[in-house]
Amino acid sequence: MLLVYCDISQNQKFKAKLKLGLTLRASEVKIQNMTTKTDLAYDRIESMLVSGALAPGRFIATYELQSMLDMGRTPVHQAVTRLAGEALIIIKPRHGLQIAPINLKREHLLLQLRRDVERFVVQLATERASSVQRKEMHKLCEQLKSAKTMSLAKFNVIDHRIDQLFLEAANEPYVAATLRPLHTLFRRIGWLYHSQTAQVTALQASIDGHVAVLDAVASNQVKQAVRATDALMNFVDDMFDTLEQQLKPEQMDCNAIPKAE
């Protein structure tokens, strides 16, 4: 699912012109195309971060990312710069790039921030969502409910879209800038929890939690949406006990030396 993280005012300007039947200047078309490529590069790299295809702690050069994505230098560089600004990639002068290692203690602490900001965004989304956005929320809810079995990869695509949809409905760019990198951090935590620990059967509990939030937001039930969000954050909080007990150091930083058995 393609996420759009570009300058909102610039995109609105383009869309307004198109709706009015006005012709975009060549320079504007070029900017719009490059923005789309940058968004695509960002989305693909973010997906690889979440799934571990880009392992925590891995050192990598920009040209390697270009090859992996089959994209040019400019969109990849711009996407990396954005990810570095969100502390998801570390730029090492003269040494290339490093995928941010996982620090469970730090990320557990950041869950407190996410809990507060998520509650605020969910409340705004519930109050402000358009009929079109609510319709999409209901569709996503049905997708989650109807799937007898769902892969973690498929769930992550839907989860990604839910996060984006709530931010779009809330329509608060300053809050979105804070919450987006937190979403990535915790999707990566969720991926590890569901794929690398003994709790591999717990995906249904996560699905049920998302369904409860989606259903309440789509139905304009503010109190229920906030309660469901708190319950989902509690579920994420509980993940950390398991992760701290079961994850190996090299799963959090591929440069770590494995402990002797």
Image: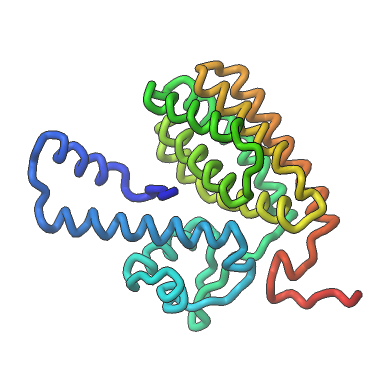
Q: Dividing the picture into quarters, in which one does residue 204 lie?
A: top right
Q: Residue at x 63, y 30 (%)?
A: 229
Q: Residue at x 48, y 60 (%)?
A: 83
Instruction: State the residue in front, 123 or 224.
Output: 224
Q: Residue at x 60, y 73 (%)?
A: 58
Instruction: State the residue in front, 81 or 243.
Output: 243
Q: Where residue 158 appears, x then y in whole percent?
A: 53, 42
Q: Residue furthest front?
A: 148
Q: Is residue 97 above or below residue 15?
A: below
Left or right, 72 with respect to 212, comes to left
Instruction: State the residue in front, 205 or 56.
Output: 205
Q: Dividing the picture into quarters, in which one does residue 212 lie?
A: top right
Q: Residue at x 43, y 40 (%)?
A: 174
Q: Where residue 173 appears, x then y in whole percent?
A: 40, 39
Q: Is residue 42 above or below residue 187?
A: below
Q: Where residue 157 appears, x then y in whole percent?
A: 52, 47
Q: Where residue 168 appears, x then y in whole percent?
A: 41, 35
Q: Is residue 57 above or below residue 150?
A: below
Left or right, 143 with respect to 73, comes to right
In the picture, the quarter occupied by the C terminus is: bottom right
Left or right, 186 with respect to 64, comes to right
